[in-house]
Amino acid sequence: MNNIDIAKGIVFQKLGIKNDSFEDRLISQKKIYLLQSLGTDLGYEYNWYVRGPYSPSLTNYIYNNIDVLSVSDFSTYKLSNVAEKNIDLVNKLSELKSEINLSMSSWYELLASLLYIKNNSSSWGVSDSDSIFKKLIGYKPQYNNQQCKTAYDVLIKQGLINQEEKNGET
């Protein structure tokens, strides 16, 4: 196993990356997207797909390696403090959905989708949170404006979106 596989194995274990069900795979995609957005780059490129940001190469990697990575002992290896902090933050996001009646996979999909549109605002033709919400709801009508606002506020409070961008300054 090379260094990148070891690093990914540690990250996958700490994030609870699984391949058991569609919901597990969806959460895995979104958690890795959010983690990479915080600066812990695992080398996956994302594009927009039906359920939000999606990385085909991540799917392939998980399918080909999760059985080995999920049971390997990485206790002699250590991630950087920044990577550990970012992983903790991505995991903490699951605790912050209490106000919203969504499944965990829908919650992570909402967070990652909002962030993806925000991060690619020029190509999406959006300039503020209201236009981001409108664009997202156009693609994903299962979400409403209040859910978008709550999730967007979580992204701001957790540092995934700068505070000054909250009021339409992008």
Image (cartoon, helix red, strand yellow):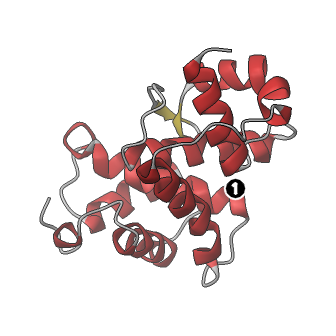
Residue in the picture at 56% in, 21% down: 3
- Image position of 20 (left or right of 135): right
Q: Is residue 46 visible?
A: yes
Along the line of sight, which residue is nearer the eye, 90 or 88? 88
Along the line of sight, which residue is nearer the eye, 89 or 144? 89
**Helix, strand or loop at mark 1:** helix
Residue tagged by mark 1? 105
Residue in the picture at 48% in, 26% down: 44
x and y percent of residue 76 in the render? 68, 37
x and y percent of residue 139 in the render? 48, 48
Residue in the picture at 24% in, 46% down: 121
Residue 143 occupies quadrant? bottom right
Quarter in which the N terminus is drawn: top right
Residue 59 occupies quadrant? top right
Q: Is residue 141 visible?
A: no
Residue in the picture at 49% in, 51% down: 112
Q: Residue furthest bottom?
A: 99
Along the line of sight, which residue is nearer the eye, 61 or 26? 61
Q: Mark 1 is on which residue type?
A: Ser
x and y percent of residue 142 in the render? 61, 61
Q: Residue furthest left?
A: 169
